[in-house]
Image (spheres, rainbow, N blue to C red):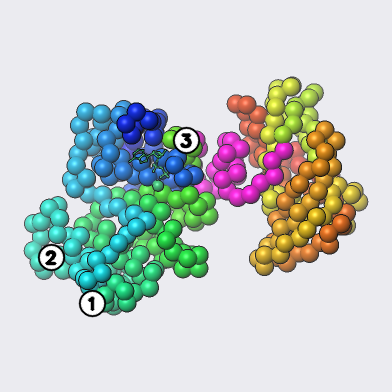
Amino acid sequence: MIEFKNVAHTYGSSISVEGISFHVKSHEVVALLGPSGCGKSTILRLAAGLERPSAGEIWLEGRKVADNKSITRPEERGIGLVFQDYALYPHMTILDNVLFALGHRRSGNLTAAEKQARAMDALQKTHLDNVYDAMPHQLSGGQQQRVALARVLAPNPSLILLDEPFSGLDNRLKERIRDDMLHVLHDLGTAVILVTHDSDEAMFMADKLMVMEHGTIVQAGAPVDVFCRPHSAFVAEFFGEVNKITSTAKKGVIDTPFGEYPAGDIADGAAVTMIVRNDGLIVDPRGDEADAVVVETIMLGRYSIVHLELNWQPIGALHLHARMSGMQWFEAGTEVSLRLDASQVFLFSENHSIPSETMLDNADKLTN
Ligand code: ADP
Ligand code: MG
């Protein structure tokens, strides 16, 4: 559907994105995930034709639509864009808001009746046909969000670009709208690129994830794959809070607060970063070793965060967080044993990472 081939872009003299290569098929929802300023919106703007690449090529449905010399105009691309700020016209009905999107040149040869039918069809797909004659202020935030989507669907785009479309919604509403939207998008079978800085949202919505850092795609793959086999500490940390421990590989092992850990093929003397997701650190009050002392427990309802202090010889006192599901309570000062869930532990050294399968083997050695 759309393909980027080694695309770069600059704003003035500063590089915004570089070496961007990926493709999105029809029926596929691809999420671009990364921190603010990493270049996500720029990629959408390039796809839409609002920016011109400084290098590389962009192809849409088998046609080249942009390189550093020529560019196909946005209105000739058949792409629908929903931005975070999806302002509806407050003085127009829902139907008129959608019809307005069909007023552009691209749909100019449709008769009034055809436009009406297209608009109603888009409203039906987004489950808004029963409120077609309402005014925007009469609709909930979630319904308004769907009007923005209907407006984009009406001209039958082959690709839909969503730039942080849920960030203006409160949390509970967001979950419902996301769910709604996911079903609508799956039913449509249109190719979608969704931009977000929220890893839960990306995991929930996407068939494929692309993680960005400083203007480049650092990892791409199926969401579960990226989650389970992050290629860098940056990617691992992007999915939620982690404990980060630095050490050095010596004679095939790494000295860690949790004992000696097999270094795999990490070279002797290499600096190692060990990432333990908060969910991967398991507190066992009945374990036989006193590994750490509870500093504080914070119960958040669905899960609890246990703050721990652990004395680790080379460094001194380490502060660690364990996330446990449900209501868990450990009195401050309690001595506890710690275990690791190796599927949530990752080792990184310069130019090297150990995938979690290896870690699973290692874990048996460590925890037995
Ligand atoms: P994201 O959407 O991931 O937050 P953007 O694609 O908006 O990131 O921005 C990427 C980089 O380009 C940032 O460093 C940002 O400051 C810069 N940038 C974005 N828009 C412009 C602009 N119109 N002019 C100059 N620099 C810009
Ligand atoms: Mg952005």
> Residue, x 10% and y 56% (percent of image)?
108
**Foreground tag (1 vs 3):** 3
Q: Tell me the CA gap for discs 2 and 1.
A: 18 Å
Can residue 120 be seen in this snapshot? no
Residue 3 in the figure: left or right of residue 180: left
- Tell me residue 342's x, y (percent): 71, 44
Query: Magenta residues, as a range?
Result: 218-245
Disc 1 crowd, CA 10 A, few/some/many (<14, 14-19, 20+): few
Identify the mark nearer the N-term, 2 or 1: 2
Mark 2 burial class by Cα count in 10 Å: few <14, some 14-19, many 20+: few
- Quadrant of image for the C terminus: top right
Identify the amino acid type marked 2.
Glu
Which residue of the protein is positioned furthest toward the top in this rendering?
268
Residue drawn at x 32%, y 77% as measured from the top left: 138
Three-letter amino acid code of the residue under disc 1: Asp
Give the residue pinned by disc 2.
114
Label 2: element kind: helix
Gap between marks 1 and 3 measured at Cα: 45 Å
Residue marked by disc 3: 214
Q: Mark 1 or mark 3: name the one nearer the start of the chain.
A: 1
Q: Nearer the viewer, mark 3 or mark 2?
A: 3
Residue at 14% in and 59% down: 103
Viewer-side label of 2, 1: 1
Q: Mark 3 belongs to which amino acid?
A: His
Is label 1 within 8 A of ligand 2 (CB to nearest ligand atom)? no
Label ID, residue 200: none
